[in-house]
Image: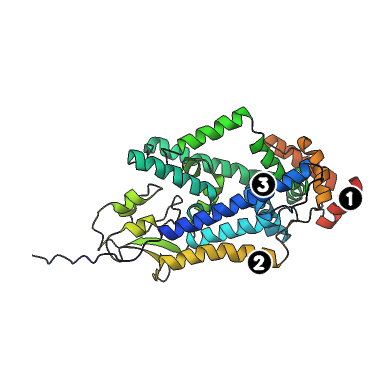
């Protein structure tokens, strides 16, 4: 009779308290950015009669489409667009986090993910379990965020030329897109309010409804995370099939059925690793070297990538934009007339108009600035 293998209990401390602290601090930072932006808006609304508080560059982080287009322009031309430079570096930081440590932004820094966790955990404490949609419904819904991401990719990479992308970034709409976004939420229509309300309510019983089914940003990071060299590995020999990892996974990944967790839904929260009761059964590993990585080192790495990348932007003078308060005041007066393409047809029309006007030439920031001053 074979001798039963001795089970060594996992005594490694969990990382969830650290993750919660990081999430909370980042959420407080976002609230502080919102407060600063409120006083900046107040300055504009009073036509400059109140004290001027400089626009917080961190607001660029809430402009993913503008940041994505800035990233595309940067890759093609090496130009850092001056309208929302902080957004570009935040985008790069988030992308790097995903390429190195998986889809970690969603569970470590994203304020929407943080709020989703809080309200879903509240439901779970009362009803003991979150609702999981059946597979026949879950898979089609998960494809929505990829369709939204696909539309953005198609519009930018296949319909719009580099000249058109630059023209959009130079447009008055993009220059004040953060202000437009502010007014969208603070002067919200009934339809938008109903949609947001429904999404919020669905996120209570169905954990991370927006993140799982609708967020195109999460879709992009999920794809990037597949290239991450850091994966959660399961030792099948030592696994006792307790199923605790499955219950702990907020993304409903069947961790106990795989040797390596390779999923675009894994957010690198490390809940599954924390709850595993057997030592060295679930752990972080470098795929190529098969070397174990301490969870705390991974946490430090995740936060460090974001801080170092945004710090580089600050040190190199690419954090605050170059728009003066006088220009902001002028743009604010006509902000209601500023719009952007909202369909494939309108994107094609915009691209054709830009091509006709520019003759295929990219207008530099200095040339554009001179043109704007003449129009003012």
Which of the two discs, 3 and 2, labels the residue nearer the N terminus?
3
Q: Is residue 68 visible?
A: no
Q: Position of residue 364 (x, y in %)?
A: 81, 56
Give the CA distance from mark 3 to mark 2. Answer: 27 Å
At a point 77% along the width and 51% down the height, the residue shown is: 52
Quadrant location of the N terminus in the rendered image = bottom left
In the picture, the disc for residue 156 is: 3
Q: Is residue 282 visible?
A: yes
**Disc 3, disc 2: CB below 8 Å?**
no
Say whether residue 220 is left or right of residue 125: right
Residue assigned mark 1: 373
Dot 2 or dot 1, earlier in sequence: 2
Q: CA distance from mark 2 to mark 1?
A: 30 Å
Image height check: is 7 above or below 108? below
User: Which label was assigned to residue 312?
Assistant: 2
Looking at the rendered structure, the secondary structure element under dot 1 is: helix
Whether residue 95 sits left or right of residue 118 in the image: it is: right
Residue at figure coordinates x 51%, y 62% from the top left: 302
> Label 2's element?
helix
- Specify the quadrant of the image occupied by residue 238: bottom left
């Amino acid at each position: 009779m074979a001798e039963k293998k001795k089970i060594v209990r996992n005594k490694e401390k969990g990382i969830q308290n650290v993750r919660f602290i990081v999430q909370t601090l980042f959420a407080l930072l976002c609230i502080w950015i919102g407060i600063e932006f409120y006083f900046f808006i107040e300055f504009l609304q009073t036509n400059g009669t109140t004290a001027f508080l400089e626009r917080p560059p961190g607001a660029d982080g809430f402009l993913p489409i503008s940041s994505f287009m800035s990233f595309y322009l940067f890759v093609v031309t090496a130009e850092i667009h001056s309208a929302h430079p902080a957004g570009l570096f935040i985008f790069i930081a988030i992308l790097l986090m995903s390429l190195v440590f998986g889809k970690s932004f969603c569970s470590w820094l994203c304020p929407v993910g943080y709020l989703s966790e809080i309200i879903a955990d509240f439901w779970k404490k009362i009803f003991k379990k979150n609702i999981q949609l059946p597979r026949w419904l879950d898979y089609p819904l998960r494809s929505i965020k990829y369709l939204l991401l696909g539309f953005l990719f198609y519009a930018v990479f296949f319909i719009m030329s580099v000249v058109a992308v630059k023209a959009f970034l130079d447009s008055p709409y993009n220059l004040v897109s953060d202000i437009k976004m502010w007014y969208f939420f603070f002067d919200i229509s009934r339809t938008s309010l109903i949609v947001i309300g429904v999404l919020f309510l669905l996120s209570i019983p169905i954990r991370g409804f927006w993140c799982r089914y609708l967020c195109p940003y999460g879709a992009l990071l999920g794809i990037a995370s597949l290239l991450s060299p850091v994966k959660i590995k399961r030792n099948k020999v030592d696994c006792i099939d307790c199923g605790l990892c499955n219950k702990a996974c907020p993304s409903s990944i069947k961790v106990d059925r795989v040797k390596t967790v390779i999923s675009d839904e894994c957010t690198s929260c490390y809940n599954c690793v924390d709850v595993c009761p057997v030592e060295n059964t679930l752990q972080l590993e470098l795929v190529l070297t098969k070397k174990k990585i301490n969870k705390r080192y991974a946490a430090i790495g995740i936060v460090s990538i974001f801080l170092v990348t945004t710090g580089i932007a600050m040190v190199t003078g690419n954090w605050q934009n170059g728009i003066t308060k006088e220009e902001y005041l002028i743009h604010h007066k006509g902000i209601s007339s500023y719009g952007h393409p909202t369909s494939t047809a309108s994107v094609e029309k915009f691209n054709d108009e830009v091509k006709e006007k520019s003759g295929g030439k990219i207008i530099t920031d200095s040339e554009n600035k001179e043109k704007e001053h003449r129009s003012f």
